[in-house]
Image (cartoon, rainbow, N blue to C red):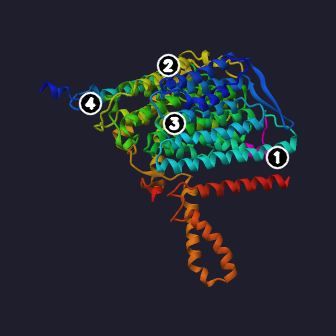
Amino acid sequence: MSNQSKHPFSKKYWLDDPVHQNRVVRSIYAVCALLFIADLFYSKHPHFSFENWFGFYAWFGFFAYVGLVLLAKQWRKLVKRDEDYYDD
Amino acid sequence: MIEGLNPAWVLILGGVLAPLVPPVARRWYLLAVPLLGLSQILMLPYGNSGVWEMFGFTLVTLRLDRLSFVFGLAFLIAAVIASLYSWHVRDKVQHVASLVYAGAALGALFAGDLITLFVYWEITAISSVFLIWARRTQRALTTGMRYLIIQVGSGLLLLAGIVLHYRLTGSIEFGHLGLGTLATTLIFVAFGIKCAFPFLHNWLQDAYPEATVTGTVVLSVFTTKLAVYALARGFAGEEILLTIGVTMTVFPIFFAIIENDLRRVLAYSLNNQLGFMVAGIGIGSELALNGTAAHAFAHILYKALLFMSMGAVLFRVGTVKASELGGLYKSMPITAGLCIVGAASISAFPLLSGFVSKSMILAAVAEEHHWFAWLALLFASAGVLDHSGIKIPYFSFFSHDSGLRCAEAPKNMLIAMGITAALCILIGVYPASLYSILPYPVNFVPYTTMHVVTQLQLLMFAMLAFAVLMRTGIYPAELRATNLDFDWIYRKLIPDTVAAGATWFAGHSATLGRSLRARRFRLMDGAYRYLGPSSGIRQSPPIGTAVLVLMAVFAVFVLLVLAT
């Protein structure tokens, strides 16, 4: 039995536990919240006026990412073929 | 160091002689050659040397200045790292090809005249294809042939441009060329092919993922960055490069997101990174060119690191298809950690190399008030985080456990990746190490409160978006598929059209006049034999097609020369 617990397939890793996975995701939320608030605490010296909008980079990062993933999904509909498309 | 010896020749000669070295000493020899090259470049004084008089031309084979030095140093460091990474490889073909290819790329960097540039330009093409063929599969053979046609074709365009340029100006000096004549336009397109400009880019995504485990690492370093250097030397400040560069940063992202082969994802990502460098060349200010050189240096290291980590996965598991992978951090924890360093570097997290290099290019674009280009580059930066920052490490090492279990990567691979990761961190933490060797004096400060906070906002909120898209199931699944790109034109449309035309003609030729038939039939029959389905382009290496294409390019070249 002790042999079995050493088998790599049965070994449980910290990240295998959904509770811990949730903890990782929540820590991203927390870091984002802190970074968003951080905009209150320093003065910007931007090149462009829109950089002065509150949390501009945060908004931009989030929506750019969502936008490009959604666009890529549409793109896939257009260009996706079988894996052996060129091999026939 | 040996007085006046060109580091390029150290590597080329070292490569040619490699098979003669006894097997017991060969590994150390393969490491010693690039190390000798590295010591050469560090000792050589700036200036022109290796000047040859030949057929009335003055050839400058070794021009070392601040621009060629940065690229040369990066090339040689990468060559040393690649030797360590390939320590276990016993294939002599790859030993010779790696060193000769690296040496030829260095020779082209140091070329002070266009003829020397052309000679080395073609040697890089011919030597590098063996890193693809060394995989010794039918697929690698045909892919390599397509790669070779395009690379040699780039060289022929370069030659045509050089001959016209010489007729026009009487000069073969490789300095600032600028667009404006047919001659320099041909040279520009030749550089653009190797730099993977939009619509000229597909050789990169086609060929690099088909090379050997170690071959892809070597390939990722040289050809494209040589082209970046050549553009910076010849076409700095050409405004069209800003448009081209920005386009290059944006469009590969969409392919990278839906691509399943993770080495092909990295090839698209390479294309996107080149875009940042090309945009910098388009701006052409001192800050922008410093940014391009810095980004090329940083990029060579983190891109090699990413290709090495995926190479290690391929070496151990036998595939790098995202749909088959997952959970590998359990088997390869060190590789996973080093891959994350590379992923964070390319994403430009503070304290890593991408942060201190890419920001120079964005600052230079902002200084010229190109707000649209700047926003597009910022958009592309969020894209980099997706395909290289998250997708590569997440789908191979984390995600759903695929059940695959293997050994950690071999020690030599870990050492090579470890050194590269250390350099990524060193440049990020101590940017002066890189800034001090850039072409122009640097008074750029990467670590300001605003820059650190805004960059972290951009990256962390993009990561937040990834978490949300994964949790809601919106993020596209990794699927086994081929995604059509521009190469569809020459891999499917043209061969199919010609074959269909030939078949149709064979069927209808009876109704046509006899003499007409005989003449045309011979032509179409020939096309059918070369390109048709029976002995066609897709089954055997299309040597006939290769020769046809090269002949056509050469014919255009001869006509151009005669016409002027």
Q: Kindly report the distance in space between the C-alpha atoms of the residues bearing marks 2 and 1.
A: 47 Å
Residue beneath disc 2: B422
* Whether labels 1 and 3 share one chain: yes
Q: Nearer the viewer, mark 4 or mark 2?
A: 2
Q: Residue at x 73, y 20 (%)?
A: B4
Asked whether residue B483 is drawn in magenta, I would say no
Q: Nearer the viewer, mark 2 or mark 1?
A: 1
Q: Kindly report the distance in space between the C-alpha atoms of the residues bearing marks 4 and 2.
A: 29 Å
User: Is disc 4 surrounded by few (<14), some (14 to 19) or many (20+) residues within 10 Å?
Assistant: some
Q: Kindly report the distance in space between the C-alpha atoms of the residues bearing marks 4 and 3.
A: 35 Å
As drawn, the label of residue B215 is 3
- Residue B20, percent across and down? 56, 30
Q: Chain of mark 1?
A: B
Query: Considering the image in quadrants, where does the N terminus of chain B appear?
Result: top right
As drawn, the label of residue A16 is 4
The amino acid on which the numbered mark 1 sits, given as a three-letter code, is Leu
Q: Judge by depth and name the residue closer to the eye, B149 or B11.
A: B11
